[in-house]
Amino acid sequence: MKRCTQCQSVNVDDSKFCTGCGSPLPAYVNTLPPPVQTAPFVATAPVPRTSTSTGPFILAAIGFFVWGLGNLPFVDNEIYFHETWIKLSYGAMLVGGVLVAVGILIAQSQLSRLIGSGATTLAVIGFGLLGLSNLPLVISLNTSLGDRGLFIGSAAGYILLGVAILVAIPNVVRRPSRF
């Protein structure tokens, strides 16, 4: 029997890839002693390897919700021209982006196992930039710095998120299992 070095699943000797995670298995065989049965086999439910907390993901979802609400005043021209509503809108987008970044940061260890630590770090920075790029416009709407800060921060945030997706691809796409 072969034990996978990635997920510790036990595989038959002639397997080339792990039945648990699809990783390539070493060429040597008989790395485990033969099983000793002392009691009849009783099927049990699989035990999850890690616990998954949903809290950070709910926080990120709330962040997206708040971020989306921040965009609504831009739909109606009557609301758009009231400075108070615009500042509230940019404030909601700032808070929403930061909530998403914090949610990802809290779930970093869980996400790193799925998409890799590089992609997770880039996502945290990207969403943080998207949210924080609204800060100059929350402070004052009458500055060219606010507009430039919004566009530069947004562009950098979106670029980092695109790179995060590209970095995550090798970690998410697995080789097909050959048994």
Image (cartoon, rainbow, N blue to C red):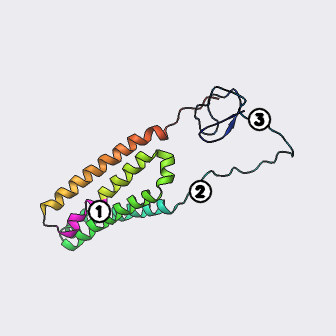
Residue 67 pos. (x, y %): 34, 62
Residue 8 pos. (x, y %): 65, 41
Question: Magenta span has 135?
Answer: yes
Q: Nearer the viewer, residue 162 or 8?
A: 8
User: Who comes first in sequence, dot 3 or dot 2?
Assistant: 3
Look at label 3 and name its amino acid.
Pro
Please report the residue visible at 59 percent of the width from the left and 35 percent of the height from the top: 22
User: Who comes first in sequence, dot 2 or dot 1?
Assistant: 2
For the residues labelled 3 and 2, the Cα–Cα distance comes to 30 Å
Look at label 1 and name its amino acid.
Asn
Left or right for 130, reference 99? left
Which element carries disc 2, helix, strand or loop? loop
Quickly name the residue at label 3: 33
Quickly name the residue at label 1: 71
Q: Which residues are magenta?
A: 131-142
Q: Which quarter of the rendering shows the C terminus?
A: top right
Residue 127 pos. (x, y %): 34, 55
